[in-house]
Image (cartoon, rainbow, N blue to C red):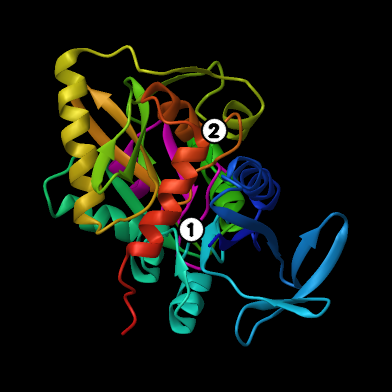
Amino acid sequence: MKKNIAIIMGGYSSEVDISLESGRMVYQHLDREKYTPYQIHIRKDKWILAEQGDEFPVNRHDFSVQLGETKITFDCVFNAIHGTPGENGIILAYFELLGIKHTSAPFYQMALTFNKRDTLSVVKNYGIKTATSVYMNQGDIIDIEHIIAKVGLPCFVKPNNAGSSFGISKVKTAEELIPAIEKAYAEDPQILIEEFLSGTEVSIGVIEYKGAVKVLAPTEIRTDNDFFDYEAKYLGKSQEITPAEISSVQLENLNRVAQQVYEVLSMSGFSRAEYIFIGDEPHFIEINTVPGLTKESLLPQQAKVAGIELSALFGEAIENALNRNSSIT
């Protein structure tokens, strides 16, 4: 019997349009012989099932939808929401309370990994190399001299809880620091200021596939922009080389660290993490637990190199979710 799959997309953050693209990609490629997919738009003002231009409200008491005389319930939720409430775990806690399986990691792991500061604190404890950082909360006194003394120039200013490079600035002079901090605070009341690491930048996906953790081929990022920002990611202003043109030693080190990060963070489902090489050593930057699934996105590129078609990639995520024990007992 075919399974009903709710593909949740949209969300409450600046990433809503990217999420809608990712969700539509999943909807287009799911195997119709195994699954009946539904596009569920999650917005602040409404949760609806979108069907051929019509909208049907979602009953939030049990996450069902009434289509005429038929009540639709779902066997599994495919999470395609970048940012809140999908990537930070909020809506996943709701599904776990309802006993509905989903394709992401449990809600606590999602909340942890969405918080860049807390994620860095965990991985550092396992000896994984990272950039030097300063953490700030909105309202803190901004001591420019202290910040520059710790992280140097240039440096990056980032929202602590955000994705797709929204709110990120590369700061080259002391005068640019305050505007960059204000820009980051516009996205999130917590920010992260990191030293600039000069080296080869790579992004690498780690997934569950056929009962095991699978590290995909890394993508090397080359961009004419100051960094891998929104334009570079989604508007074609970067060169993405998959597999990355790195040495065998670098690849071995990257594969080992990427799997270690996935495991120490107790991940499941999809992830894609960013690293910068200093010599042969990858330095962890951040992890994305709902990576982009658009035609421009890196994880689908990496899966293709591994010989995994999108229908298999998405279908495997659903099967893993259906067979996974819930974290709520």
Q: Which residue is mark 2?
A: 297
Q: Residue at x 63, y 31 (%)?
A: 234
Q: Nearer the viewer, residue 20 or 121?
A: 20
Other residues around mark 1 within 10 Å, as few (<14) / some (14–19) / many (≥20) = many
Which is more foreground, mark 2 or mark 1? 2
Task: Report whether 21 appears left or right of 180.
Answer: right
Q: Sequence-wise, which precedes: disc 2 or disc 1?
A: 1
Left or right of 88, for residue 28: right
Answer above or below: position of 97 versus 326.
below
Name the one closer to the observer, 161 or 137. Answer: 161
Q: Quadrant of residue 207?
A: top left
Element under label 1?
Answer: loop
Residue at image point 40% right, 70% down: 107
Residue 179 is covered by the magenta coloring: no
Q: Which mark is residue 161?
A: 1
The image shows residue 313 at horizontal and vertical percentages of: 45, 40
Question: Which kind of residue does numbered mark 2 sit on?
Answer: Ser
Q: Please say if the residues under marks 2 and 1 sit with CB atoms less than 8 Å apart.
A: no
CA neighbours of label 2 inside 10 A, class few (<14), some (14 to 19), many (20+): some
Disc 1 marks which amino acid? Asn
Residue farthest to the bottom?
61
Measuring from the top left, give residue 72's x and y in whole percent. 67, 74
Res 258 → quadrant: top left
Q: What is the distance, in whole Å, between disc 2 and disc 1 at their CAs?
A: 20 Å
Looking at the rendering, the stretch of residues picked out in magenta corresponds to: 139-165
Q: Position of residue 182 (x, y in %)?
A: 59, 53
